């Protein structure tokens, strides 16, 4: 009798597990298109935000099509690559590859008569991944001084986000007070050397063209942003210098 009861219990449990697993699999399959759509919308909103264009779920596609004039991937030599969709590139996986094998996404934006280049960035904070987008505005001036002319050297906008940084501290990288100071900073000096952006604990030099303040109490995450920018933007420096479109 006990054997029969045990067999019945085992069979009942097995059937129940199979049913639940099937329902969960069906639910995940059904929800996947909506989840992918949400990721796409958020990504397009972030790209637009980096060039100071606000969007909603309802108008993001229209604005994206209106302002993003081109997109492509580069190799480490600054050459365009074929057959790779820049929008679907997983930067986290690309950064695991040797630099010469990475696909580097670029999104070009045109707003009125100004040209921008949007670059995705990805790195590590205190507790998990951090990421964002940096836009650079094309210098339209005719430089006559001794400085080396680099078309894309000045930051126009910056958007950062995180997965699990400490609320009130490192999590503040997604707040305007941290992001706005990146505007008008430069990632090359007048000698054409790549200098990226320094995130300074204790206060940035107000006269510096490549320093911003770190978050008080969020030094590790702030330095993670600095490392993220240095790692990601340095891969593009050859292209920034040679761009002549």
Image (cartoon, rainbow, N blue to C red):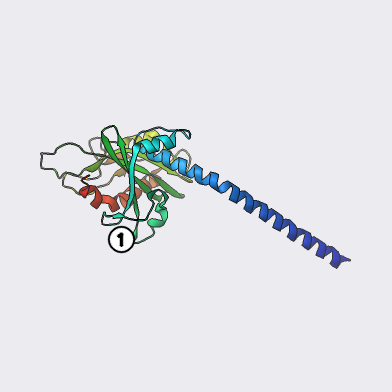
In which quadrant is the C terminus drawn? top left
Find residue 218 and report its image quarter. top left
Dividing the picture into quadrants, the one containing residue 185 is top left
Q: Is residue 106 visible?
A: no
Q: Position of residue 123 (x, y in %)?
A: 39, 50
Can you name the residue that lies furthest to the right here?
1
Q: Residues within 10 Å of mark 1 (few under 14, many from 20)?
A: few
Q: Is residue 73 left or right of residue 15?
A: left
Side of 232 where 28 appears, left or right: right
Q: Residue at x 35, y 33 (%)?
A: 52
The answer to whether residue 13 of the structure is visible from this angle is yes
| Quadrant assignment for the N terminus | bottom right
Residue at (33% x, 49% y) in the render: 72
> Which residue is located at x 14 percent, y 37 percent?
142
Position of 4 relative to 240 (above/below): below
Where does the image place residue 28, in percent across and percent down from the top left? Answer: 60, 50
Q: Nearer the viewer, residue 85 or 199?
A: 85
Left or right: 126 in relation to 226: right
Task: Identify the residue position indicated by label 1 in the image.
Answer: 100
Residue 227 x %, y %: 34, 50
Q: Secondary structure at mark 1?
A: helix
């Amino acid at each position: 009798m006990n054997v029969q009861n045990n067999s019945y219990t085992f069979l009942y449990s097995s059937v129940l597990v199979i049913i639940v697993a099937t329902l969960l699999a069906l639910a995940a399959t059904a929800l996947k298109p909506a989840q992918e759509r949400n990721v796409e919308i958020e990504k397009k909103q972030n790209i637009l935000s980096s060039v100071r264009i606000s969007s909603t779920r309802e108008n993001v596609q229209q604005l994206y099509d209106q302002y993003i004039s081109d997109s492509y991937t580069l190799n480490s030599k600054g050459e365009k690559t074929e057959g790779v969709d820049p929008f679907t590139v997983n930067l986290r996986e690309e950064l695991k590859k040797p630099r010469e094998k990475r696909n580097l996404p670029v999104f070009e934006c045109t707003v009125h008569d100004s040209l921008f280049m949007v670059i995705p960035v990805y790195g590590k904070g205190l507790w998990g991944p951090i990421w964002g987008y940096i836009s650079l505005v094309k210098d339209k001036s005719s430089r006559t001084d001794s400085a080396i002319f680099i078309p894309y050297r000045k930051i126009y906008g910056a958007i950062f986000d995180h997965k699990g940084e400490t609320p009130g501290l490192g999590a503040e990288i997604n707040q305007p007070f941290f992001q706005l100071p990146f505007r008008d900073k430069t990632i090359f000096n007048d000698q054409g050397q790549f200098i990226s952006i320094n995130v300074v604990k204790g206060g940035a030099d107000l006269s510096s063209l490549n320093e911003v303040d770190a978050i008080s109490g969020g030094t590790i995450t702030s330095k993670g942003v600095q490392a993220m920018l240095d790692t990601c933007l340095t891969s593009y420096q050859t292209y920034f210098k040679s761009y002549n479109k």
